[in-house]
Amino acid sequence: MTTYRTVRGMRDFLPADLAKRRFVEEKVRECFNFYGYDEVETPILESFDLISAKAGDEIRHRMYAFKDLGGRMIALRPEITPSIARVVANKLRTEVKPLKLGYIANCFRYDNPQMGRYREFWQAGFELFGSSHPVADAEVLAVNNELMRRLGFTDFSIKIGHVAILRQVFTDEGVAEADQNRLMELMDKQEHTKAYHLLSDLKVSDDCQATMKGLFKLRGTDWKNLLEKGRQLLQQKEGALAALDNLEAIIGFTRSLGVKTELFMDLGFARGLEYYTGMIFEVFVPGLGIALGGGGRYDHLVELFGGEPLPAVGCAPGIDRIALALEKKGLFPDQLTHVEKVLVVSIQKELLPKALELASNLRKQGVAAHNEVTGRSVGSALSYAGKKNYRYAVLVGSTELERQCVILRDMKAEAQREVPITNLFNEIAFR
Ligand code: HAM
């Protein structure tokens, strides 16, 4: 006999694991609601070209890609933003703006499986289309902040930077987009020495080299001071200065939106995805060296996919890593499901139909009343109810039934009493 295991990097979610994921998802949906994001779903399979257009080499090389039987090059989505931009470009063109779309979906990346890095993982997403105003960027940061707070995190920080500062410096030097992408990828991986070497190879000016060296050093929590130093460094570089002003405006609005979370500014911060055009950020909790979520502004993706030019900003909190952090910090509530279960058991075999009828009536009234389905003894059924955290057991016996009553056993208190069937719902629902 062959024993089959999950494919490497894939995970089964047993009930306790799934309850944790659902807890995170519930909080995500609360945020959709509070900030006006309408939930959408897109297919797991996408055209390879769509996903790889602006994915960046790192993700491009880690895609599950294959030819389908029709000869089309297909990818299992490694993220959802291109799919949402495709939908906006094709199907929601005429929708009133701003358009706010949310999602919760699984993604696939052929990453090396390790803590917090899986080959199938879940992202939540908030994508806002139709505003280039810094308040839109600030709102995306505020949504992330709200999600983290609702989940119970008190200690976390947001790392923030701005792609346009870097790209403007490169563009002023005439660095081609493909080379800019290579530079950004190295910076994303914190490989600054390799980035310097590449800059030398590209024969950029000494001023550009010095500016980049300066920008790499501008990182820390004193963002006001860092912005000031950035301004000094970028004197005469109009485009980069405008991006710096934009970053300052965004931070200002996040403060008005009530975000008091620590901001770690890093002016040499880049992200692997190539579609970013403005502010970028990632969320961290102390003790877990991997980002719980990330996002930023991407103003040209909808246009690239055939839509009208449409500014956009968004983010994707990673559900698995959030769950991991909640677990590590002991922040999951003891009781992950709030449903109080009731097990209905017949004491005598011939009363089984009556027990089934009773459970059915309780369900109609909104009680999670389950049937005892094995025909085992009352003792075994009660032992099962104890192990499976039932709140009550209802015992249907002939003696009590003669008086139109049943026994209601409180599994927590380990006490039981006779109650009239007509009162059973009230006794369970309004203790
Ligand atoms: P990302 O930074 O590539 O951004 O992924 C977002 C989050 O997905 C990460 O912060 C992490 O929590 C989670 N994640 C990524 N890879 C893995 C993995 N192998 N295992 C577990 N979790 C993972 C994006 O995907 C962009 N689409 C975000 C965005 C939305 N930007 C604008 N809108």
Image (spheres, rainbow, N blue to C red):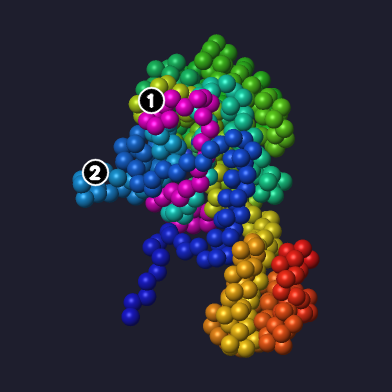
Residue underneath mark 2: 72
Q: Which image quadrant is residue 402 in?
A: bottom right
- Quarter of the image containing the C terminus? bottom right
- Classed neighbour count for the residue bearing mark 1: other residues with Cα under 10 Å, few (<14), some (14–19), many (≥20): some
Residue at image position (55%, 20%) is 243
| Cβ atoms under marks 1 and 2 closer than 8 Å | no
Residue 353, image x, y percentages: 57, 80
Is 11 drawn above or below residue 42 in the view shown?
Answer: below
Check if residue 116 falls in the magenta segment.
yes
- Classed neighbour count for the residue bearing mark 2: other residues with Cα under 10 Å, few (<14), some (14–19), many (≥20): few
Residue 155, image x, y percentages: 70, 46
Q: Amino acid at mark 1?
A: Gly
SS category of the residue bearing label 2? loop
Residue 223, image x, y percentages: 67, 28
Q: Amino acid at mark 2?
A: Arg
Residue underneath mark 1: 307
**How far is mark 1 from mark 2, CA to CA?**
23 Å
| Pick the front one: 304 or 60 | 304
Residue lying farthest top?
Answer: 236
